[in-house]
Image: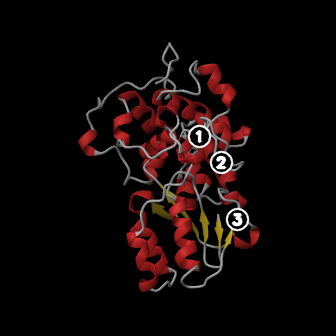
Amino acid sequence: MILSDEFVYLHQPKTGGTFVCEVLADIYAGRTGRKYTNWNKHGGVESIPPEFRTKPIVTTIRNPFDYYASHFHFGWWLERELSPDMFMLWKEKDMRMNCASYPYISFEEFIFGALRFWHAQILPERLVPGARAVRLGPFTLTMLYYSLPGYEETLERFFATHDTADLKRGIAKARFLHTESLNVETYRWLLDLGVPAADADPVLFKGKVQPLNTPNGQILPGGHGQPRSTHWTSLFTPATRRAVVQNEWLFFEMFPEYSWPAECVEFEQAATPDASGLLELPRSGTGD
């Protein structure tokens, strides 16, 4: 998280946050001399220090389908050491009990694990049953974790009333930078902060940041750990797409700009969802 007198930037993993942090270092601080503190890298709203809680919140969001694909290719569970603040999607024991080939899992098994076990990683235990009961998916919960003041209390009310009004009012106070148009939106944000256009202009031409996220940049089994070469649509089947849509329904409602690309709507429109809204693992339990 970045703390300044003008804003708090919350760094949601896998949404372009490293790009934004580099821009703030190079331009906001480097070119204009403004001060900020880099603190608690992936901390959410609840961990903002009290003296900064009145500052405007800025964070980044991403197409949920692309987000899941990015996490899968990142492959954090494969042969690497992670910093303590890295967002884990599940506990290894849970996945090993359900996926015979773990850690070498298929994309379908990855989606199963994320939708089935991620809640326990980002919610207090008392709130997990409520999230599952209303199918509030892990990506939606993560977005709220980085944008919703009074995160736990507001969720607790929602689980009791099923009224989304408080959630929507809460996130309306945050500024969301979209990963897909990060250069332009970060540039506009800098201008709104009073950064001169001449200083902010390099943001428009800055390349995508690809952190070195594996030892020596090596490619891990299954191609994990490096930027993928295929579009995220190639990973999804009707079943995995439907599982994401059913469990991230609130995110799609809050951010209607995100959907499955029109040219890829080749899936059955009236498919009957499974009872739980989650995928069932293949009987073999084998991965790619």
Vertically, is 258 above or below 105?
Answer: below
Q: Callout 2 environment at 10 Å: few (<14), some (14 to 19), or many (20+)? A: few
- Horizontal side of residue 197 vs 48, given as left or right: left
Residue type of the residue flagged with mark 3: Trp
Query: SS at mark 3?
Result: loop
User: Coloring scheme of the render?
Assistant: secondary structure
Looking at the picture, which amino acid does disc 2 mark? Met
Return the residue at label 3.
Answer: 39
Are circles 1 and 2 on residues that touch, CB within 8 Å? yes
Which residue is more in the foreground, 43 or 137? 43
Q: Residues within 10 Å of mark 1 (few under 14, many from 20)?
A: some
Of the residues under marks 3 and 1, which one precedes in the sequence? Answer: 3
Residue at point 58% right, 49% down?
142
Look at mark 2 in the image and give the residue it sits on.
86
Q: Which of the two discs, 3 and 2, labels the residue nearer the N terminus?
A: 3
Q: Give residue 136's position: percent from left, percent from top.
A: 55, 40
Q: Residue at 44% across / 47% down in the picture?
A: 227
